Image (tube, rainbow, N blue to C red):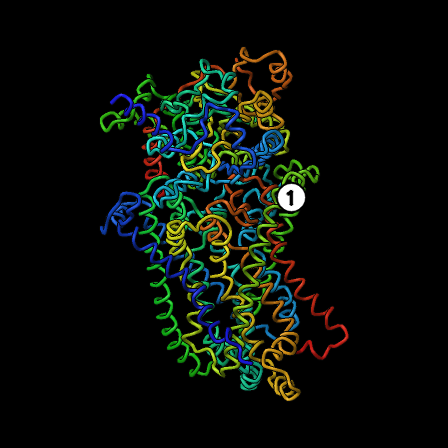
Amino acid sequence: MKSLALLAAMALPLAAHAQTDPADWDAVTAAAKGQTVYWNAWGGSTTTNDFIAWIGAKVQDEYGVTLEHVKLTDTADAVTRVLAEKQAGTDTDGAIDMIWINGANFAAMKDAGLLFGPFAEQLPNWQYVDVDGKTVQTDFTVPVEGFESPWAMAQVVFDYNSEVLEPMGSMQAILDWSTANPGRFTYPQPPDFLGTTFLKQVLVDTLVDASVLQQPATDDNYEDVTAPLWAYLDALTPTLWRQGRAYPATGTAMFPLIADREIDLSISFSPGAATAAIANDELPDTVRTFVLDKGTIGNASFVAIPYNSGSFEGAMVVANALLSPEAQARAQDPNILGYGTVLAMDKLDADQKALFDALDLGIATLSPEELGTVQAEPHPSWMTRISDDWTARYGVAQ
Amino acid sequence: MKNRVLPVVPALTLLVMLGPVLAGLYGTVLPAFGHLPAGGLVGPNLDAFRALLDWPGLPRSVMLSLTTGIGTTVIALALVMLLVAGWSGTRAFRALERLLSPLLSVPHAAAAFGLAFLIAPSGWIARLLSPGITGWTNPPDWLIVQDPLGLTLMLGMVVKEMPFLLLMTLAALGQTDAARARAIASALGYGRTTGWLKTVFPRVYAQIRLPVYVVLAYGMSVVDVALILGPNTPPPLSVQIVRWMGEPDFTARLLASSAALLQLALVVGALLFWRLGEIIVATLGLRWITSGHRGASDAPLRIAALSAASIAALSILLGLVVLAVWSFSGFWSFPNALPDAFSLKTWMRQSTGVLDALGETALIAGSVTLLALILTIGCLEAEYRQRRNLTQRGLLLLYLPLLIPQTAFLPGLQSLLLNVGADIGRAPVMLAHLVFVLPYVFLSLADPFRAWDSRNASVAAALGASPDGILWRVRLPMLLRPVLTAVAVGLSVSVGQYLPTLLIGGGRVATLTTEAVALTSGGDRRAIAVWGLMQTGAALVPFALALIIPALVWRNRKGLSHG
């Protein structure tokens, strides 16, 4: 009986996926050689695309892995793809080997058993990851359990034109300013990721006690909890750019609006993006960033591997390369990407740490101290419901 | 020796052209009625339609689809007819005619980008006029691009569909004896435009009816232009279908399928409505014609038509110019008329990706066009040898893939391909492109092919040439120019395909068009400009070659170039 259970336990991972053991790194790199990894990642930003190309060159040189960036306009496209493959019985060698993912998309895929893993904590570079200080083991309150590997930290900052306005400390202050200066502020249209983040930021900042958001939304408490958000938006919407009758499609579409002097204030999920955009001639050099007094929402970006990837070893090699101090320092360089690192500085040796110390964060980037408190992401159920409600209230009936 | 392949070519052509359409529709119907066994959903039921009716954006979405399609068709058709009526045969008309091929081949997405960069409140026109004339230091808070009524979307579509209708009209004019009709009408004292409308228009319209239907169906279901210029609160139905297809949830896929059927019903309904309109216009028109009004003072109509056509042509050309400026631009703030600095940075940054996508685009477009050309020539030659001409019904079949909205059958086709495991890679994408490339190549080549003077064949046969020998050594060489034009048409149609590449390629097939449209959401004008220009180049260069190559080949045998 005992041996039977043991056999079953051994057979399970085999049945679930192919032969290579994620913990046996030599076997992983050996199998990865010559594989092509199709990384489905949002492709709307030139700087991100360049960084992904750089990682591609690195894994090609070091491990013989070919990385192809499949540029998405929406991560959900990739999730659909894997779902569709499962529905069609394509259980091996699916179209996607790796997805840039977090939040609701991760929760949906993990729930549906569409992910390969656990693999993240077996990666050699996991040893450097800041598991205590950064939210890398939960993703929007959902336990990660090794089914996705972190590669960048994000935190909400507001980008503003310092020629015409001062930093503001609360969402209420932003509403007051927008009322006095109509047409100079907007946010990306939900369900865009940054757009829903803006809604959550409003909610977190206007609630007296935001801890309720850490539990799933219920039919009982949803209306009460979100009432301040809708009151806020009812007041804000008529003062927005284009009176809220049109919205930018994504977060990056907001920088050109500032450069065109269409708006003076925008929201961003990347504290270093403004500096990078100034260096890239995409923003005027008068743009600066601020955070709210009570802090702003932060989270990690991850990469996950679909259960039916034919090149999961190659994808693990890429995930590991993304965690290397060299890649992390490059990603944090505001001239390149300006993303926050997921590594703990005290786990690095002197040479590795020097890579980070050498970085000049740039004129528009706040220091880690100035970034202040990081507010936790609400449970994904809030985001889904708020996003649907937003669409019904503001997205289709203007 | 008898050619054994040739007789089956027409059937084969129909199969590759209509097979995917019918299969795709079949693949759409099942999930629309809740039947998606692999997703654990078993129908049939009407849940998806109920959910569709519950979607609060539906009325506006449907309205947008209808207004865009009908508005585009009415405006574009009216302008083209007035232009031809008032100006055909003049020097101004010939100048516009020369611009026709380039204008036609500019991909929809690139033209839409150019237009958006021109007319946005912070666009080039506003920059040129500010602050000097307008006094603006900040752009005005006007909702021009992505307006909720879809007027800018309609404008973009009109500008892009006018060249197509004009080309079709010019082809039809040759068969209508227009010059004599106009001479008689003006001798009887009719105004230029009025006389043309009364005597030539009825005959021309009968010839261009199907292309007009294509414009109507396409205007109702366009996705890429709508993503760039159209509203988002809510978007037109076709865009919403693509969005639902992209959601991680199975039920959204059912919703997309039911919406796809609705889209199909809308297009069919609009076509019937249009047909009804034709009958009404014909009845009223007949009364107008027999009333004998001479319309001698219709000159303002002429001016208006020429102005509108010139503005349309200019807006595409200027749009390309502003794309070029942006692609070399350093920092460029409002209201400066030009960037602070010019650099090659964007081109360098994008070069690798652009060249990869160009290779992919060229490979797909080249293979698809070659295949389409072989099938087309096969069909036409079979028709010639069997002395059978294409019937009106046959012509309708040819137009069918262009009349059925892409959003109605491509989602279903994607599911079906997935089921047979053939969804990955570029071969299925090529098959999907072929559905759209074949009709255009056929339409482009058919008339010159049939108009070829068959006495040349008699002479060649008398000299001992076989039927195949006549085709390869006499007919096709003489038809070099129209063959190359058909190739250029095929290439540009393939280059411009967005939805088939996106949905059937599953994101793995990155062409210039899919990459350019993907950049829309990021709003990086420099990157968009580079990709838009490359996309335009990929579509334009073949047209230039189609002009240059015959001139080189025939430099010492001019007589042939009139074959």
Label 1 amino acid?
Ser
Q: Position of residue B200 (x, y in %)?
A: 50, 79
Instruction: Using the image as rendered, state which of residue B116 and residue B25 is in the foreground.
Output: B25
Instruction: Give the left or right position of residue B99, taking residue B56 as reference.
Output: right
Q: Quadrant of residue A14?
A: top left
Residue A398: in sight, yes or no? Answer: no
Indicate whether B380 appears above or below A207. below
Q: Position of residue B24 (x, y in %)?
A: 38, 57
Mark 1 surroundings: few (<14), some (14-19) or many (≥20) residues within 10 A: many
- Considering every residue shown, the one lying at the far right of the view is B556
Q: Which residue is mark 1?
A: B327
Residue drawn where x is 42% and y is 29% of the image: A102
Residue drawn where x is 27% and y is 50% of the image: B35
Which chain does tag 1 point to? B
Secondary element at tag 1? helix
Instruction: Using the image as rendered, state which of residue B22 and residue A46 is in the foreground.
Output: B22
Q: Quadrant of the N terminus of chain A?
A: top left
Q: Position of residue B342 (x, y in %)?
A: 70, 40
Number of callouts in the render? 1
Indicate whether B56 appears above or below B427. above
Instruction: Give the left or right position of residue B408, taking residue B227 as reference.
Output: left
Indicate whether B529 appears above or below B541. above
